[in-house]
């Protein structure tokens, strides 16, 4: 099988690679097992010294990596560069905090000594998506490796060059071989690796259907797993919100990465007495976005990552039209590339597909509600529970409302962002487990109790 990297702007093939056979994967994973024996014996302080060199490599080569990201999946170059810088930041965070997070916790039980210690599990398989081809890998790999595990990566098939470059980052930083290993494989071989008990844990960022399948396989093998799945994040605007600020954040949150983000705001739920002001301000902000060549530093909206996404997004808009909406496309048409113009859907309703699925693209439905109770009801009405945003001038009111929203993250008067300092993950069908923070660091460890008596 060939893995093709296609430029979504030029529609040309960037690179082509041969995928690995199962036998090749088996051989690499055996080497990873040997690497684990050595890597897990190091202290946390010794491991974090390697992370410092990873951060150096990322910062030194950020322009190179950014260009690869943009060529493979169409992200505007300034956003690609920011993505690489964020990968360096996660290294900084765990360099500073991992030793403290993983130190033994002593407990008074009346014995001579009682404590909880955190020991790595072994080989952790990461199955990662294309939308943030560096960040998604690093937010999985850095805490996992820091805890003493080794990682094997199955990346999305449309970003093979990014997958290989990530491996090279670790090697250039001086990591021992096979502490981090990229496997260029298809989903079938990925499933076989889990079924045949070749890894000790699995972390997936992907769709609900993929999460269900991976969760079933890992469960049968009695392996721990973390699932970071879809989102349909509500963006609630109360009548006392700063409308201009909310509209600016709405445009950024929805259209960053051309709307291809799990934690992007996807449903805009606005109280009826400010709906007109919000709609005017929101559309004004959308029309400010520059659409075009993602290698242009001024571009805000690039192409979507795959050609087939354009047709899928059009079907979502047509469904809304059939159900009474009057969608408004903003910005200019582009002559080449897999472009979909940013589209506003006023007066959206809960029966529309756009309000019920995870929309990966630049479409923004706006739902009008009469009060905050209705806003909460609609916010909680989907199968997802990843993130949410609440905009209000009354912080006490906003915090009370935030507690009523069923999600893993709520941002008040700001955007939902993954941040190494905070746990990241969802509830309901948005996932299981947490990444980042000290919580994510301990997802793939044996939390072992030790009691010492005389």
Image (cartoon, rainbow, N blue to C red):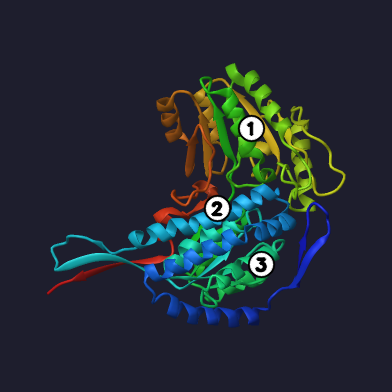
Judged left or right of residue 241, residue 347 is: right
Decide which of tag 2 and tag 1 comes sooner along the chain.
2
Mark 2 in CB contact with mark 1 (< 8 angstroms):
no
Label 2, on which residue? 86
Which is nearer the N-term, disc 2 or disc 3?
2
Which residue is drawn at the image coordinates 84% and 42% (left, top)? 334
Residue 174 higher or lower than 293, as above or below:
below
Can residue 90 be spotted in the picture? yes
Is 339 situated left or right of 448 in this image?
right
- Read off the residue under disc 1: 350
Of the two numbered discs 3 and 1 on the same chain, state the one appearing first in sequence. Answer: 3
- Residue ID for mark 3: 187
Determine whether label 2 and label 3 are within 8 Å by CB: no
Tell me residue 336's x, y (percent). 86, 48
Q: Residue at x 67, y 71 (%)?
A: 184
Q: Nearer the viewer, mark 3 or mark 1?
A: 3
């Amino acid at each position: 099988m060939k893995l093709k990297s296609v430029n979504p702007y030029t529609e040309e093939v960037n690179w082509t690679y041969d995928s690995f056979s199962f036998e090749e994967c088996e051989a690499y994973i055996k080497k990873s097992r040997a690497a684990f024996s050595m890597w897990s014996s190091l202290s946390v302080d010794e491991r974090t010294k390697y992370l410092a060199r990873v951060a150096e490599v990322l910062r030194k080569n950020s322009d190179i990596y950014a260009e690869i990201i943009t060529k493979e999946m169409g992200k505007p170059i300034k956003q690609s560069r920011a993505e690489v810088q964020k990968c360096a930041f996660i290294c900084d965070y765990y360099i500073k905090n991992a030793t403290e997070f993983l130190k033994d916790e002593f407990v008074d039980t009346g014995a001579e000594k009682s404590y909880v210690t955190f020991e790595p599990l072994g080989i952790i398989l990461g199955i990662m998506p294309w939308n943030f081809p560096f960040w998604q890998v690093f937010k999985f790999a850095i805490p996992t490796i820091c805890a003493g595990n080794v990682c094997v990566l199955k990346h999305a098939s449309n970003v093979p060059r990014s997958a290989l470059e990530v491996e090279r980052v670790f090697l250039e930083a001086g990591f021992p071989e096979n502490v981090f290993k990229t496997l260029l494989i298809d989903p079938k071989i990925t499933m076989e690796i889990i079924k045949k008990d070749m890894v000790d844990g699995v972390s997936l960022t992907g769709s609900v259907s993929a999460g269900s399948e991976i969760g079933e396989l890992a469960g049968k093998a009695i392996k721990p797993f973390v699932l970071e799945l879809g989102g349909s994040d509500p963006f609630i605007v109360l009548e006392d919100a700063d409308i201009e600020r909310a509209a600016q954040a709405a445009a950024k949150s929805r259209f960053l990465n051309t709307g291809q983000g799990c934690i992007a705001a996807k449903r805009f739920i606005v109280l009826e007495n400010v709906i007109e002001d919000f709609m005017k301000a929101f559309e004004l902000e959308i029309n400010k976005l520059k659409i075009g060549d993602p290698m242009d530093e001024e571009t805000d909206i690039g192409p979507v990552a795959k050609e087939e996404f354009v047709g899928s997004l059009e079907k979502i808009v047509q469904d809304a039209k059939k159900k009474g909406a009057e969608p408004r496309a903003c910005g200019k048409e582009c002559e080449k590339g897999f472009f979909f113009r940013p589209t506003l859907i006023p007066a959206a309703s809960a029966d529309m597909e756009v309000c019920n699925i995870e929309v990966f693209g630049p479409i923004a439905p706006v739902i009008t509600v009469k009060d905050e109770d209705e806003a909460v009801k609609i916010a909680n009405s989907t199968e997802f529970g990843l993130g949410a945003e609440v905009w209000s001038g009354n912080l006490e009111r906003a915090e009370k409302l935030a507690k009523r929203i069923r999600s893993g993250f709520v941002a008040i008067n700001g955007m939902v962002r993954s941040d190494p300092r905070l746990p990241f993950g969802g509830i309901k069908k948005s996932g299981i487990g947490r990444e980042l923070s000290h919580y994510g660091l301990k997802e793939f460890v044996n939390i072992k109790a030790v009691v010492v008596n005389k």
